[in-house]
């Protein structure tokens, strides 16, 4: 089997798997249907892009279709960007303004009209023969790279804000959404860098290397798609969005600290609130609720969530996530040393103190004690 045949087989498998994942996302029952549909369309576009390894076999002489297929890659990153927004924020909805993300796709197709779409067949054949040197194609490829890195940076900024809001407002130790989206974005970035390096080989005389690079890119695309399949099948409930109206403490702190009272009175009020909060945490143990949020805790102790957020995240100088988990770990440490509860397993203890993941419990426990739960119990 030659390299071209091997590459075609990989491409066919990758396209099939991508379309299978798109079908799964369209049909799986979930609360976040918008995110699933956006991701499904993203994989349909990915399948269309990967079909370029064999697409020419079915459109002989239909140059317009092939060029239009090229330009659809400009819709991929906008869809991924909107998908990340839909996953991170439970109240995200598509609006007319979001269609502005399709402007680069429209612009490129308009640019291709005089030099290609409106040209005769002879000019179109010539276009394909020397398309690597044609200004319109160079503009297209430049725009693709600019757009890609604009959106990849935007996604990382969204994830950074999402992580901050999550840590300041939620105590659920799973935190799987951020981790998975961050991993996914990083994998996409690494894969794209390889694609860019492969594309640069097009302008060299290393034809053999370019062909092997295509095989490598096709294989990577297949592996990434299979990884998504496994994640989606094993964790259909993966996505946990937060409210987009939440603000980071640093964004609300300046206006919140503009008070008329003297500093010493403010300090006394803050000390009283901290004392009240810690007493409530010790006596009522609200941290035993795995899904505890800062909104729920504020309602329980009659402190506005805005003030409670500033109190914990700024004055106590801990994320709400870490603040709550510290109480959970202290409770776990007490149980681990309690001889009357020696029959309890580590798994039973972590559920009892409010964790819902063994890996998260072990990570948090080691963070506070520098020991694993088992080592601590036996020490």
Image: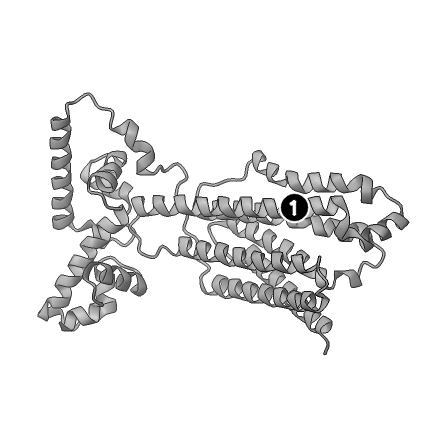
Residue placed furthest toward the top:
260
The foreground one among 44 and 74 is 74
Residue at (11, 49) in percent of width and height: 283
Drawn side of residue 250 relative to residue 216, left or right: left
Q: How far across and how far down the image is residue 263, in percent?
A: 15, 26
Residue 192 position (above or below residue 9): above
Residue at (24, 57) in percent of width and height: 354
Q: Which residue is mark 1?
A: 142
The foreground one among 152 and 163 is 152
Q: How far across and how far down the image is residue 302, in percent?
A: 20, 36
Mark 1 neighbour density, 10 Å: few (under 14) some (14–19) many (20 or more) = few
Residue at (76, 50) in percent of width and height: 133
Quarter holding the C terminus? bottom left
Drawn side of residue 159 relative to residue 188, left or right: left
Picture quarter containing residue 261? Answer: top left
Q: How far across and how far down the image is residue 337, in percent?
A: 11, 67
Label tally? 1
Residue placed furthest toward the front:
205
Residue at (61, 59) in percent of width and height: 197
Q: How far across and how far down the image is residue 180, in percent?
A: 44, 57
Residue placed furthest toward the bottom:
1
Drawn side of residue 137 relative to residue 281, left or right: right
Q: How is the image coloured?
A: one colour
Quarter holding the N terminus? bottom right
For mark 1, give the secondary structure: helix
Residue 216 position (above or below residue 306): below
Picture quarter containing residue 107? Answer: top right
């Amino acid at each position: 089997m030659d390299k071209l045949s091997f590459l075609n087989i990989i491409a066919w498998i990758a396209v099939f798997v991508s379309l299978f994942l798109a079908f799964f996302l369209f049909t799986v029952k979930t609360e976040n249907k918008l995110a699933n549909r956006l991701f499904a369309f993203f994989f349909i576009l990915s399948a269309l892009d990967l079909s370029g390894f064999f697409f020419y076999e079915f459109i002989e002489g239909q140059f317009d279709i092939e060029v239009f297929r090229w330009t659809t890659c400009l819709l991929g990153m906008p869809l991924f960007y909107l998908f990340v927004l839909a996953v991170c924020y439970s109240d995200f909805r598509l609006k007319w303004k979001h269609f502005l993300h399709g402007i680069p796709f429209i612009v490129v197709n308009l640019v291709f009209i005089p030099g290609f779409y409106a040209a005769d067949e002879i000019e179109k054949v010539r276009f394909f023969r020397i398309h690597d040197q044609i200004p319109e194609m160079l503009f297209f490829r430049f725009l693709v790279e600019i757009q890609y890195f604009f959106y990849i940076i935007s996604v990382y900024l969204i994830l950074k804000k999402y992580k901050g809001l999550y840590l300041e407002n939620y105590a659920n130790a799973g935190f799987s959404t951020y981790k998975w989206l961050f991993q996914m974005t990083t994998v996409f970035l690494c894969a794209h860098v390889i694609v860019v390096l492969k594309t640069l080989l097009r302008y060299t005389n290393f034809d053999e290397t370019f062909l092997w690079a295509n095989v490598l890119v096709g294989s990577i695309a297949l592996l990434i798609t299979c990884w998504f399949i496994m994640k989606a099948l094993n964790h259909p409930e993966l996505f946990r969005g937060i409210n987009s109206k939440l603000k980071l403490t640093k964004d609300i702190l300046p206006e919140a600290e503009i008070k008329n009272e003297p500093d010493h009175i403010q300090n006394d009020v803050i000390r009283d609130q901290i004392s009240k909060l810690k007493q409530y945490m010790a006596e009522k143990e609200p941290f035993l609720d795995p899904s505890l949020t800062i909104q729920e805790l504020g309602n329980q102790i009659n402190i506005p969530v805005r003030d409670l957020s500033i109190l914990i995240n700024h004055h106590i100088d801990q994320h709400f996530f870490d603040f709550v988990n510290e109480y959970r770990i202290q409770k776990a440490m007490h149980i681990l040393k309690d001889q009357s509860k020696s029959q309890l397993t580590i798994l039973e203890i972590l559920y009892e103190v409010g964790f819902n993941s063994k890996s998260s419990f072990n990570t948090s426990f080691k963070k506070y004690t520098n020991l694993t739960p088992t080592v601590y119990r036996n020490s």
